[in-house]
Amino acid sequence: MASTQQTGIRRELEAADKAAGASLRPAVDWHSINWRRANRNVRRLQSRIAQAQQQGKKRKVRALQFILTRSHSGRCLAVRRITENPGKRTPGVDGQLLDTPAKKAQAVEKLVTEDYKTQPLKRIYIPKNTGRKLRPLSIPTMQDRARQALHLLALDPTAETTADPNSYGFRKERSVADAIDQSFKTLCRTTSPQWILEGDIKSCFDEISQEWLLSHIPMDRKILRKWLEAGFIEQRVHYPTIAGTPQGGIISPALMNMTLDGLESLLRTNFPIRSGKKVHLTRFADDFIITGTSKEILENEVKPLITEFLNERGLQLSKSKTRITHINDGFEFLGSNIRKYKGKLLIKPSRQNVQSFLAEIKTTIRENLHTPVNRLLRLLNPKIRGWALFHRSTVSKEIYGYVDNYIFCELERWMLRRHPCKSLRWCHQKYFTRVGDRNYVLQGIIEDRRGKPRVIRLEKARDVKIKRHIKIKADANPYDPEWEVYFEERSALQMKDSHKGYGKMVKLWFDQNGRCPQCGEKITRETGWHIHHRIRLVDGGNNSMANLALMHPTCHQQLHAGTDQQHTYCESPHPP
């Protein structure tokens, strides 16, 4: 049996070596790539990696990862990912961007080369949530990002398969709302544990032991070592990196998660259910909470165990942020305040989160003193809507009203600064209008794509309805074919709930079964979407449902580039 498995793996490796030959493949034309076939090939290999990992076949996992990282489909999707995310306009130390189809095609071809050399990272600093301290961010070059994205395609199925069930940060199909709901389920009952250890790891990305990563991460160690030892450039001076993984690399979150995975199983082994100590972990990236029946258990038994676990990985708990709290006193976790009031657990937006959001709104309004109303509304509405949707699954209605009132007062000050010689009543008459039974509605006029005027109004946080979030199942694996139907149903519910105000877009999504008509892949919040007019507006088309289609941004660009039916070669559709 073992010899048969070895023969199969050897055949796959030989096929990969043959497919990696650049001389056998024509030059890449970015707008002619068959994305449907590329996605199908990569997804098939990722599913096989996940299944092999579940069966404990480590050699087969390495062989399939080898095939995927050298496949044409994987290289195309890696370049596509880094040119669609928000960081696509941020260059590395070389100042290069992949902003044209020719450059993207060239990047795909460069991923074939085996003599790969990393470039140093560009070090910048961004403010932390508190606004007082700065967080170092190390930015790789676009070519290094593409290489990381390629290896992440092969590593992520293993990371998902071996991950802790109640880990929710930087994982596919998981969110902050899942972590908050898990906290609620752990603490809401009268028999639930009453004490919570709030844990935070000090400089997690910057302090992870590189030797531990090289010994335990199942990927090409030569490539990983090059990334870890690339160093960074700050003010034209090169500094070496002796610890950590760059916070800014596309693969770094997966490396961090794999470093911390195993903590939940360690706690379950040392504190089984029959012990009655009710020790449970909920983790989001490097922030976590651990429950217990008493302060002494958390202080004397759980905390030393965590400290030992982290020390093996070169990490340590942050003394300033790690504390033990009673549920009646409440604690803050991921922007929410979790506390019991007379035995009833309520989760609300935290005071710090609300103040941070209102400070951002205040800054936006004050920096746009002479901005036309319609442009100001375009700046404010996404912020208000996004913050309200983030907290819609918590007890937020009263705080929504407070936020709306604060924004109204800030807008009154904005009007008086624009017109210092006018009265507040005059400003109300100039800027506000009445809509239905609601007074003092700020509105403006914008032009749609056809140049026709359209009314835009200030959105209210209180208009967002409170809706209980349905938590993802702890063992759900997006790379396991057995969970395919579950994730499709969950995606449909999320799309319907998150975009209720966009009736036409939601109807298009359901009419297309949630898939792009160009490539056949799912359209999600992560992929983004464009609305395509089958007959262009300039050619007499309209905005009727029959003339619209929902597509991925890249597929939309490909369609408008005049793509014919000739596609570049991406692996055979048959399994290798």
Image (cartoon, rainbow, N blue to C red):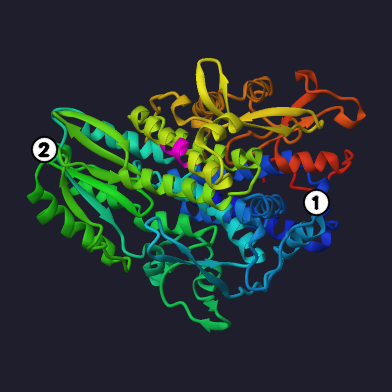
Q: Does the segment drawn in magenta span residue 526?
A: no
Q: Which residues are magenta?
A: 406-410
| Above or below: residue 318 compared with residue 344 | below
Q: Amino acid at mark 2?
A: Gly
Q: Of all residues shown, which one is farthest toward the top?
A: 436
Which residue lies at the image location 50% right of the left edge and 36% below the top edge? Answer: 424
Mark 1 lies on residue: 30
Which residue lies at the image location 49% right of the left edge and 39% below the top edge? Answer: 412
Please state if 170 lies on the left or on the right of 432 as rendered. left
One can see residue 133 in this view: yes
Q: Does the segment drawn in magenta span residue 409?
A: yes
Question: How far is disc 2 from disc 1 in space, using C-alphas?
Answer: 59 Å
Q: Position of residue 299 (x, y in %)?
A: 12, 54
Please state if 496 lies on the left or on the right of 468 as rendered. right
Q: Position of residue 531 (x, y in %)?
A: 73, 32
Which residue lies at the image location 35% right of the left edge and 45% below the top edge? Answer: 334
**Observer-nearest residue: 8 or 342?**
342
| Above or below: residue 563 compared with residue 25 | above
| Above or below: residue 316 compared with residue 422 | below
* Residue 82, image quadrant: bottom right
Mark 2 lies on residue: 276
Q: Which tag, 2 or 1, sits closer to the chain's start? A: 1
* Residue 276, image quadrant: top left
